[in-house]
Image (cartoon, rainbow, N blue to C red):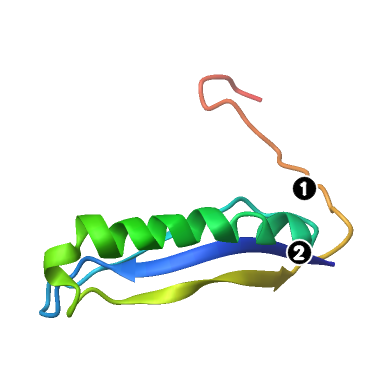
Amino acid sequence: MKIYRAIFHYNNADTCEWENWYYKASVWYNTRELAEAHLDELNKFKDFLINEYFKEYKNIFRYKEPYIQEEEIHESFVGLNIDYKDPYKNN
């Protein structure tokens, strides 16, 4: 089974050792269509960063276009049996 989310990566408009990359993402969905619904929101956020927040640093602000990330997961859930022993009692 695959799960999907919309994701947008961007940096902090710094090109030296202080450069950091951040991301904004939707939650994980079980259908691609639900994740794609968030692309418009992420594109608006990208436009805000380019035109307002980092407008003085357009030449060094870098980003990756918003895209759909997909991951393969197991379809069945296997529970774990965790044995808890209270350290304050002699069990």
Residue 70 drawn at (x, y percent) = 68, 71
Q: In the picture, which quadrant includes the N terminus?
A: bottom right
Q: Secondary structure at mark 2?
A: helix
Mark 1 or 2, which is nearer the eye?
Answer: 2
Q: Which residue is mark 1?
A: 80
Q: Which residue is mark 2?
A: 32
What kind of residue is marked 1? Leu
Front residue of 81/62: it is 62
Q: Decide if residue 73 is on the left or right side of residue 64.
A: right
SS state under label 1: loop
Disc 1 crowd rating (10 Å Cα; few below 14, some 14-19, many 20+) is: few
Q: Is residue 42 left or right of residue 73?
A: left
Q: Which of the two labelled residues, at mark 1 and mark 2, occupies the earlier sequence position?
A: 2
Q: Residue 61, how many percent across, how many down? A: 23, 73
Q: Image quadrant of residue 74? A: bottom right
- Residue 60: horizontal and vertical position, in percent? 18, 78
Is residue 21 shown above or below 28? below
Q: Quadrant of the C terminus?
A: top right
Give above or below for 31 relative to 67.
above
Q: Where is residue 57, by image quadrant?
A: bottom left
Residue located 40% across and 55% down the image: 45
